[in-house]
Image (tube, rainbow, N blue to C red):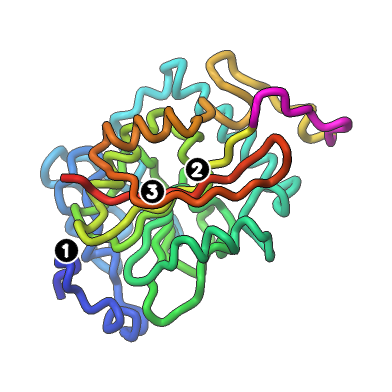
Amino acid sequence: MNVDSSQTDLGYVTRMNGYNILAEIIACPACSSNLPIGNMDTRVMCRGCKSTFIKGKYIWNFVPPVIDWSSPMWQTWQQLQDNGMVSYQSDPEHNLAVGTRKDSQDFAKFCHCSGLVLDVGCGPQSWPSYFKRTEETIYVGIDPLVQDVPGEFLKLKGLAEFLPFRARVFDHVLFATSLDHFVDPFAALKAAARVCKSTGEIDIWLGEKGVGAPSPAVSPEWYRQLRKPDLAADLFHIKRLSRDVFINIAVASGLTLVQTEVHAVDKYRTNYFYRLRSSR
């Protein structure tokens, strides 16, 4: 079965209990060459660039070896990831898509996912609440903070700017409040456009906080202990993306905006849902 084809019968894939879809979609995150990966493999080497990737007990690590972790920006990113993990563990209800959050349910309705779905920045939770359980949908998640534990869907450790997938395999690519956590959102959207089918769509949830939004009157102890790097916008984001900045990045990435939904949270905060398709 050829998953690269837009005519793939994903219903058939879903019915195949235990089908190893990873072998059909994986590619080197450093050079995009197909990776010869098998069910029992715990180590794979790219035949193109010779990069090597390792599987833990349950999770493959596809973070590419080309990252300069000593650079100021990647060190900033690492500190923000550490901050994020503290917030996820200390207050998951407000910092992860868990439970019956209305914003997550609204995004799920907006996405109306089916087929093969990639969630970029899926988080460490076992099942994001914007995922809907249907026989027609297969979820794949990628995130640098995924833990080496069994999951309810296929998860990989990796980076949005270096997606380890073949071209044009996904029906939907999701970014649920994750795009403004990346070092390079332009590269992340270009990577998403590459792995999304020509008939597919990229669905993005961005939160925007207006100027003058007041800080909480009281912050929990875990929050007060976090450190903001000099190059970061705040404790969790490298750069907050306004609507105009986001749209400019999306267009430059070869994407066309086809739909926007606006959900006001309060006087200062708004959730924007964007649907994009490849313009190339």
SS category of the residue bearing label 1: loop
Magenta region's main secondary structure? loop
Q: Nearer the viewer, mark 1 or mark 3?
A: 1
Residue 279 percent across, percent down from the top left: 20, 45
| Mark 3, secondary structure of its residue | strand
Which residues, given as a range, are shown in magenta? 210-220
The residue positioned 37% from the left and 63% from the top of the image is: 117
Question: Residue 82: x, y in percent?
Answer: 60, 34
Q: Which residue is mark 3?
A: 61
Disc 2: which residue: 178
Q: Amino acid at mark 3?
A: Asn
- Per the rendering, the mark at residue 166 is none
Q: Which residue is mark 1?
A: 4
Which x, y percent locates residue 131? 51, 66
**Residue 59 appears in view:** yes
**What's the CA distance linking mark 2 and mark 1?**
26 Å
Instruction: Answer with left or right where residue 74 lies relative to residue 87.
Output: left
- Nearest to N terminus: mark 2 or mark 1: 1
Q: Nearer the viewer, residue 36 or 71?
A: 71
Residue 212 belongs to magenta span: yes
Q: CA distance from mark 1 to mark 3?
A: 23 Å
Proximity of marks 3 and 2: CB atoms separated by less than 8 Å: no
Q: Residues within 10 Å of mark 1 (few under 14, many from 20)?
A: some
The first of marks 1 and 3 along the sequence is 1
> Where's residue 110, x and y in %?
48, 61
